[in-house]
Amino acid sequence: MKILQLDLDYAEYHSIKPESSVYEESPKKDERFENIIMLLTTVEKGDTEETAKKAMGDAVNFASRQKADGVLIYPFAHLGTNLESPEASLRIIKSMRTCDSAGIKIYSAPFGWNKKLKVDVKGHPLAEQYKSYSSSKEAAQERPKHKLDRSIVRKSDWSGLPDTDHRSIGERLNLYSAQEISPGMVYWHGKGYLIYKELVKFLREKYEKYNYVEISTPSMANLALWEVSGHYEHYIDNMFIVKDGNSELSLKPMNCPSTIMVYKTKKWSYKELPFRTATFDRLFRKELSGVLGGLTRVQEFSQDDGHIFLAEEQLKDELPNLIRFIKEVYSVLGLKYVPKLSTKDPNNYMGDDALWDRATQNLKRLLEENRMEYEIKEGDASFYGPKIDFHVIDAAGREWQCATIQLDYQLPIQFGITYTGEDGKEHSPIMIHRAVLGSLERFIGVYVEMTQGRFPVWLSPEQARVISISEHQADYAKEVYKILKENGIRAFLDVSDRTLDYKIREAQYEKVPYIIVIGKREAEEKSISLRYRNGKQDKASIEEFVRRVKEEISTRSLDAR
């Protein structure tokens, strides 16, 4: 089935006379439709009612997005070369008229008539789209067969890297891996994903404190969204494009345009602002294969992403709020950082220069009022606004961009979003794009190298390991293990018959913060012997140990021992 889809201001036709041996009787001679999606439709051999249903589903969805008043099916035999018989074509056209329209009105020009047609096509990029549909059986037959290289179904080789590299550490500690079949994407193992989830939990607590609303939006959107946002022009080379028939979609490289679509679903008053959103959705950015590197440069990732919609007069309170948020998180994680202010790239930006200047001055003022020494990165801003990036300094003195505050006057204007001000008039909000850890994948890679796997207790995948010296102490070791688990402590039990030295070395190798050794004396006294990662040893009651560890977890203490 061949379709030329047109988004029209209007269409009108005059039915002149039948031109086919099969035609519909007594049509209305003159018809006019306004704000209509018109489908110039050719039915070809092999087309079925299933084919027609798929075509109508796409057309109805498009009409709904464009807020069209209806869909007009217009039989048009001139798009194809392998036409179905008139009888079968009419049957399939009639089936299109009865497809589920989700509230969109369906109209149809008479089949088999010669008509005089006049249309006025709208002026947006997707107003004219040619589409081709095949039956499922036909499509399967036409699908090309590729000879695939099955040898890439294997783990990526991280051997030969320094022992201090996050890839080597992650492999030793069984945190994550990379697979050749998914370049630039992370396979999280149980222990590594636990660290990931603990960081998300920590950030969600902060979101609750700072009044954010967590949202989620689809992973793909039609390229029309990215054209409105400006990403199509400024970022298309880094986007993964997916073809769906004759439509093109993109896996989302960032959350901001989709978040704006959430904002657009209602009318806003200044009393409801700031509106703070947060999301951990997956993002996809195409990178050159040569720059991919473990967790620090990937093609699929999640950000602790946030977008804030507010009035300009609210910036004086909201921007310092963001600085407090970042400082609180970085203090808990023990991070040192350098703020850097990125200014407009004169060759890659959109919007009004005066608004850019105003946004840049607001960010400068924020840094200076918070007595923060900063560097200026000329021309390194995003295409829609200046930004402050917080570069975390790792164990080797390298800098990694993590937190960001981007001040955006442009995208709200691009999307035409507004709020009603105190004066009763419509105003364009300002949008702040912000992240604290940035890409969670990259942050974890950097943090693994900074800590060399010696995570603070609250982030450690395994917080304590209970080891029995011999089988005679196994029952008491199990009792201790049970108490730890009941108190929410991530513990592991080793009552195997391996030597004590072997068990301790293994726990130390895996960077377990607390090693609890249970021997004859401990079993008799109902106490525990402790070994810390730094080599020190101690004795304690189980109650005292539980209290200490629970306090370290609840306060997110940095003491990694």
Image (tube, helix red, strand yellow):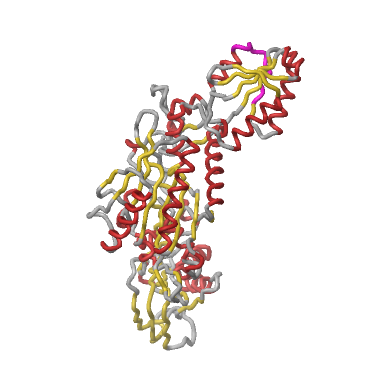
Quarter holding residue 166:
top left
Q: Nearer the viewer, residue 528 or 90?
A: 528
Q: Look at 46% across and 48% down and name the residue there.
A: 324
Q: Is residue 172 left or right of residue 413?
A: right
Q: How many discs mark residues in the rendered view?
A: 0
**Is residue 354 shown above or below 205?**
below
Q: Nearer the viewer, residue 383 or 224?
A: 383
Quarter holding residue 35:
bottom left
Residue 321 seen by the camera:
yes
Look at the image and tell me in which quarter the N terminus lies. bottom left
Q: Residue furthest left?
A: 347
Q: Is residue 57 left or right of residue 5?
A: right
Residue 292, position as x, y percentages in the image: 36, 36
Residue 484, position as x, y percentages in the image: 69, 29
**Is residue 200 shown above or below 430?**
above
In the rendered structure, which segment of residues is drawn in magenta?
Answer: 492-501
Residue 386, position as x, y percentages in the image: 32, 53
Look at the image and tell me in which quarter the C terminus lies. top right
Residue 208, position as x, y percentages in the image: 56, 51
Q: Look at 51% across and 36% down and name the residue there.
A: 188
**Is residue 114 shown above or below 222?**
below
Let me know if residue 478 is in the magenta part: no
Residue 74 seen by the camera:
no
Q: Nearer the viewer, residue 349 or 390?
A: 390
